[in-house]
Image (cartoon, rainbow, N blue to C red):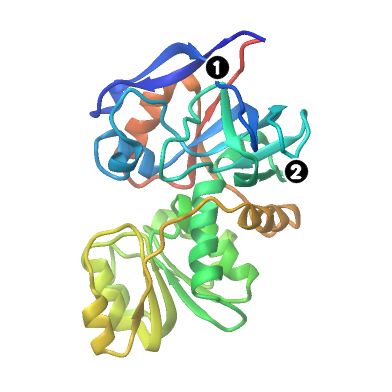
Amino acid sequence: MTATMRAIVQRAYGGPEVLQLAEVSRPEPIVTEVLVRVHAAGVNPIDAKTRAGGGFAPQVGEPPFIPGWDLSGVVEEIGYGVTRFQPGEEVYGMPNFPRRAGTYAEFVAVRSRQVARKPASLSHVEAAALPLAGLTAWQSLVDTAQVGPGTRVLIHAAAGGVGHLAVQIAKARGAYVIGTAGSAKHDFLRSLGADEVIDYTAVAFEDVVEPVDVVLDLVGGETRRRSLEVLAEGGLLIPLPRGLDVSQEAAERGLRVAPVIVEPDYRGLEHLAELAGSGRLKVCVSRELPLAQAAEAHRYIDGGGATGKNVLTVIALS
């Protein structure tokens, strides 16, 4: 196998044009790591924010570096001490977040306990779209909010990358799900199981939503403050992304605020794989582009309003 690989390299913070295809050294797995031959890499809004110098740029550090956190592929080699996988097995995951992972590449060396077996029911493209967004939704709704039968959940930006997965996860747990989105996306949300859909451009959601137990805020800004109006006593607001802090105001109202930052979690990935395998979780991929067009994928995300996820397909060198 060649000692080099193709990857997207970012040599400066800035616009999508800083993402350039280059030939770089192929990584070697150390102890506890597996070398994954990447078939597809998910593209997330946090990728674009970090590329521009925001997001998790302080954790990623100064360029040059290979961006990306989501991947799906096949184990090529295993390092000493790895017992969970063997070469040839299909895996997916979100390694090392929020530090560098470098998944916009043909090969990635990752810790074996930060990936899981790819759901057999999903293609590599679909699986690559799932880890970061899916784990964000899972860790928010299941680990933090502990939603269950009868829980009333309001999800803002419900048709987006995290939102459309959150709708399905909440429904699989037996929750009553309300989602906000533009009217053009209402049929999509209903097809995922949403019990109510609200056109945030036509009405103020706080005027029409009955009290809920949990709000998953994927918008921020004043939407976050307005969300306090619809929470029942003791209700929980999970704010994503970071921004306006309403914790003091919430406490004065007898409400709770629990910010969540997603973490690598192979157990969570296994739960997501189980949901996908049972048909209760579908991944919407809105755009599929080759690795060399990473900049175009970022331009699309920068434009806002995307439904589902964007994915880069990667064809490894022979």
Q: Residue at x 28, y 66 (%)?
A: 202
Mark 2 / mark 1, whichever is N-terminal: 1
Q: Is residue 187 visible?
A: no
213 vs 100: above or below: below
Give the quarter of the image for residue 97: top left
Q: Amino acid at mark 2?
A: Arg
Q: Amino acid at mark 1?
A: Arg
Identify the secondary structure beneath mark 1. Answer: loop
Q: Residue at x 55, y 47 (%)?
A: 131
Give the quarter of the image for residue 110: top right
Position in image of residue 300 (x %, y %): 36, 34
Identify the secondary structure beneath mark 2. Answer: loop
| Residue tagged 2 | 84
| Residue tagged 1 | 26
Position in image of residue 72 (x %, y %): 62, 35
Between 102 and 158, the residue placed more toward the observer is 102
Label 2 – label 1 distance at C-alpha: 23 Å
- Viewed as shown, does residue 19 lie left or right of 244? right
Q: Quadrant of the N terminus?
A: top right
